[in-house]
Amino acid sequence: MMNNNYDVIVIGGGYFGSSISFHLSQAGYKTMLLEQKELASGSSGANYGCIQVQDSNMGISMERTLRGFKGAMKLEETLGCNLDLKEIGSLIVAENDAEMNELDKLYQEKKDYGLPVEFLNPQDIKKIEPYIDEKILKGASYMTQGRLTPWKLVYGFVNKGKEFGLEVREWTKVVDYLRTGDVIKGVVLENGEKIYSRHVIITAGAHSKKLGKLAGIDIPVEYIKGEAFVTEAVKPMMNNFLSSAAFFTDAHGDSSNCALAMMQSKGGNFLIGETGSIGPEDPDELKFFPSKTHLRKMAGLGARFYPALRDLKILRTFSVASPYTKDMEPIFGKTSLEGLYVAAGFKSCVVITTAIGEEMTEIIRNQDN
Amino acid sequence: MEDKIIICRCEEITYGEIISAIKAGCHSISSIKKYTRAGMGSCQGRVCAPIIIKILKSQGIEAVVEDKPNFPYTPITIRDMEVKDDEQ
């Protein structure tokens, strides 16, 4: 009979689940990572891989972001694999006065904090983005950051974790917890199998709320439908990650909102996307297709910023359940149930994966002592 | 089969690369796509996916999870997709 006893069970094989699993395994904890579908099959596999610093909330989030940024830029070395990691600029652009207003606040706050942000006028933007239509822009906040290929990071954490004994099971859904009163002692899988552990960590992004409900606790992580399309690969035409300051004027919740983000991937494909519409209550029921209205709006926005893209072919479209919390602060740490922890609802992800992996390992270590 | 035989013509991914992905733990069309880029080109796996399923089966992986087909069914330009001014 298999020994179904672990120090830690991690539920959710995305950025945070894989990072936490890696860090715990490295620290000597016998860890099992469970994923209901495949690794990186949710929002962690469908984003820009942007190592974003300048849009971080202030306070503890900023401390984590800066700590995480150092860790993130060394990840290829830490994990011993190629992640397509590269230094790249981030441009947050404003198109109108309302957006300029928000952008200016964001920029000042980061500048006062000491981040190396620069304010660019439309002519400066044109210098670093030759294909952009600078006439529609008012200005941008710019900072040198990084990017990597999202799923390579998840695989990187997991494969390195396996060297330290990490076990991973894909297509494995948790349907209940093992508990004695208010103490969580493991999980029950869909096939009835029981796995025991001293600690269970929920890192399931948009699915975290449901996993909380199973244990009778509220994990207030909501999600919005992120929609995107990918174009054919072409020569390098875009040098920076671009996002719209509209994210900050009416981010999250307003379904009419269409705030653009775009980047050219290492392979040369453009990824053009936006977040803004509400999905069904259960993220498992989210349709894979973006809405026609949003898709057409996104195409228009992309072409407005970069008119030369109009002749590029769209290869694929998709939508994804992108987690967030109402106050934009993550749900992170212990819960009211002993042995149950959460790490979900983070605003920027790649940049803080290592910081969160280290902090969670510390939380588990303190709990055990 | 020879390692250098091209399986995904759009992205020029070889048999050897597909086998490496399977050995690294990718047991589905979607994970092999993410790992190798096979199926990310203009045909979106319409040519290579059936071959990759056969390769997976030859490696003893029977229950292959197929990738979902997705819009658009054939590549269309951004120009064709965007909302025109006279539509608003």
Image: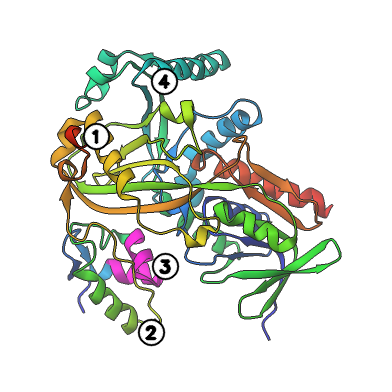
Q: Which mark is residue B24?
A: 3
* Apparent side of residue A35 relative to residue A365 in the rendered image (left or right): left
Three-letter amino acid code at disc 2?
Answer: Gly
Q: Are marks 4 and 1 on the same chain?
A: no
Q: CA distance from mark 3 to mark 1?
A: 50 Å
Q: Which residue is depicted at the point 66% across and 44% down? A: A331
Q: Are marks 2 and 3 in contact (CB under 8 Å)?
A: no
User: What amino acid is labelled 4 in the image?
Assistant: Glu
Q: Residues within 10 Å of mark 2 (few under 14, many from 20)?
A: few
Q: Is residue A140 above or below residue A350?
A: above
Residue A80 coordinates in the image, percent (x, y): 46, 52
State how far apart marks 4 and 2 are (Cα): 55 Å
Identity of the residue drawn at 63% across and 36% down: A329
Kindly identify the amino acid type of the residue bearing the numbered disc 3.
Answer: Ala
The disc, 2 or 3, on the residue closer to the chain's N-terminal end is 3
Residue at the far left in the pictured view = A311
Query: What is the chain letter for disc 2?
Result: B
Check disc 1: other Cα within 10 Å, few if <14, some if 14-19, many if 20+.
few
Asked if residue A29 can be seen in this view, the reply is: no
Q: For the magenta stretch, what is the residue range?
A: B17-35
Above-or-below relation of A37 to A123: below
Residue A247 visible to an observer of this rendering: yes
Q: Amino acid at mark 1?
A: Gln
Question: Both on one chain, marks 3 and 4?
Answer: no
Residue wearing tag 1: B88
Mark 3 falls on what kind of element? Answer: loop
